[in-house]
Image: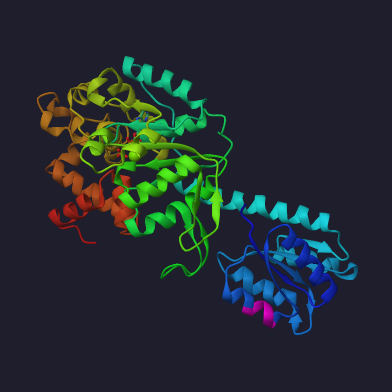
């Protein structure tokens, strides 16, 4: 339930008390006041989800407070209360950002309908925010015709429908997240939220709050109450990405959520119950981690209800070219570049190359080549960073302009990193993500190439 705390602001005592009592009976926590001053005090004290606000108050207009609330990014939703005579002003309040209005006298049924509407809108808003943050525009179909990938696709189709917990393992860049998204998209919960937590990217201290949310003031920096990812995912699916990275303390808490389906927010004592399908990924061998005493065995078995392992690219050579061509189309479209294709020798070099970074490395190499390519000329191996396989590549294929401007793969890489860094306004985290590098590697390269940043 997303709506918990409500403020009622009305100077008519009867209305205020009636509303307050009825909301309390429905187990909302309610604060009430008869004027703007009181309302400001209440709102400063705690974070609220919803305010019922009267238009005319003894010490000013409800719209003044509405404006203040709307100026805050994460403020509560506001429902105006108004008499018959001032419906027009209530409508203009909605233009200012109020969610809805009710006309006095109202029945409690009306109030319930409004609160439900606010709750579902609020949830949608929050979930969409994460959804947009987490999903990118890439088409997420699993590409591949090799036997291991065919088997993978069949398994994904079957398991998707079961709502079982799935542990997806595989080397870096093999497509674990892609598999997770496919499981979600083909599941019965495909219209429900899909929330991802990257367990490797968040510091241990913030992780618990990220998972379970926190109450206002529960630690320095917790200026507002916040729902965790498990709460946001309620009714839907959560992806615990890189699950091996979580601390022992959090492993214990996670076990409880998986077993009992309940938890408390950081700093809170209310037990929250959720129904969430759990998907997890790992690039470590979790069983080895269990043996080494780094990962709880009971948690491992809870997660490993249905194991799916994503094969590395070296076990599916037949897919390499198909993937490369898919990425070529994807990135040509993305960068608005037409008419480029791989030269035949380039295709050979792509297949011959070992791709330790798997599909991600291949995709990044193709994207880099698309960016660096000269329009109308076929892509050659050097642009993909495969220059050292020069015996495969005939000399005339090196684009003259590029050959004279840049001397080596390092130069190309330097150019590319510089360009991406500029695109990301110098933000190394974003740039590293785009480049498919981790931030530390990017920092090292910036140093190595003496890129100004
Ligand atoms: N079979 C595939 N078909 C199409 N695209 C793929 C495939 N496998 C991976 N990709 C693409 O490769 C990139 C890396 O995949 P993904 O992020 O799923 O890998 P990962 O295993 O989670 O990597 P990491 O271990 O680095 O987190 C993504 O852009 C994804 O869309
Ligand atoms: Mg991943």
**Main SS of the magenta segment?**
helix
Give the position of the C terminus as an image quadrant: bottom left
- Mark yes or no: residue 247 visible: no
In this picture, which residue range is highlighted in magenta? 37-41
Task: Determine if the magenta segment contains residue 232.
Answer: no
The residue shown at (48%, 70%) is: 217
* 85 vs 196, nearest the viewer: 196
Q: Position of residue 7 (x, y in %)?
A: 69, 69
The residue shown at (26%, 25%) is: 313
The residue shown at (43%, 40%) is: 239
Ligand 1 positioned in quadrant: top left
* 310 vs 213, nearest the viewer: 213
Query: Is residue 253 depicted above or below 155 in this figure?
Result: below
- Mark yes or no: residue 408 visible: yes
Quadrant of the rendered image containing residue 14: bottom right
Q: Position of residue 403 (x, y in %)?
A: 15, 39
Q: Position of residue 356 (x, y in %)?
A: 20, 32
Q: Position of residue 55 (x, y in %)?
A: 78, 73
- Residue furthest bottom in the image: 59
Name the side, left or right, on which 310 lies relative to 50: left
């Amino acid at each position: 339930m997303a709506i918990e705390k409500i403020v009622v602001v009305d100077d008519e005592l009867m209305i205020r008390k009636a509303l307050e009592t009825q909301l309390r009976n429905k187990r909302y926590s309610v604060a009430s006041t008869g004027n703007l001053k009181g309302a400001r005090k209440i709102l400063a004290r705690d974070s609220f989800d919803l305010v019922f606000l009267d238009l005319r108050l003894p010490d000013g207009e409800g719209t003044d407070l509405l404006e203040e609330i709307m100026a805050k990014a994460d403020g509560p939703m506001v429902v105006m209360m108004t008499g018959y005579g001032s419906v027009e002003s209530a409508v203009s309040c909605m233009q200012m950002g109020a969610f809805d209005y009710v006309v006095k006298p109202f029945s409690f049924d009306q109030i319930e309908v409004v609160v439900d509407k606010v709750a579902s809108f609020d949830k949608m808003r929050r979930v969409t925010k994460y959804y947009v943050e987490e999903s990118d525009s890439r088409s997420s179909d699993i590409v591949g015709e090799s036997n291991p990938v065919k088997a993978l696709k069949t398994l994904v189709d079957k398991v998707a429908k079961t709502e079982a917990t799935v542990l997806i393992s595989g080397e870096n860049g093999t497509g674990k997240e892609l598999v997770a998204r496919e499981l979600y998209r083909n599941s019965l919960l495909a219209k429900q939220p899909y929330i991802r937590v990257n367990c490797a990217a968040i510091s241990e201290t913030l992780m618990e709050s990220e998972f379970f949310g926190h109450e206002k003031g529960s630690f320095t920096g917790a200026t507002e109450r916040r729902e965790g990812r498990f709460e946001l995912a309620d009714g839907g699916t959560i992806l615990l990405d890189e699950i091996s990275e979580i601390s022992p303390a959090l492993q214990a808490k996670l076990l409880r959520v998986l077993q009992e389906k309940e938890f408390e927010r950081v700093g809170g004592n209310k037990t929250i119950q959720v129904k969430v399908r759990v998907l997890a990924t790992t690039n470590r061998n979790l069983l080895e981690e269990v043996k080494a005493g780094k990962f709880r065995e009971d948690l491992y078995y809870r997660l490993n209800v249905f194991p799916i392992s994503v094969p590395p690219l070296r076990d599916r050579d037949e897919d390499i070219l198909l993937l490369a061509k898919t990425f070529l189309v994807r990135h040509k479209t993305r960068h608005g570049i037409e008419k480029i294709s791989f030269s035949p020798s380039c295709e050979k070099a792509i297949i011959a190359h070992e791709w330790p970074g798997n599909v991600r490395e291949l995709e990044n190499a193709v994207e880099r080549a698309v960016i660096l390519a000269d329009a109308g000329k076929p892509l050659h191996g050097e642009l993909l960073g495969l220059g050292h396989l020069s015996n495969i590549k005939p000399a005339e294929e090196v684009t003259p302009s590029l050959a004279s401007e840049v001397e080596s793969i390092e130069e190309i890489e330097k150019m590319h990193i510089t360009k991406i860094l500029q695109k990301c306004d110098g933000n190394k985290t974003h740039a590293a993500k785009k480049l498919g590098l981790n931030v530390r590697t990017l920092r090292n390269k910036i140093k190595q190439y003496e890129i100004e940043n």
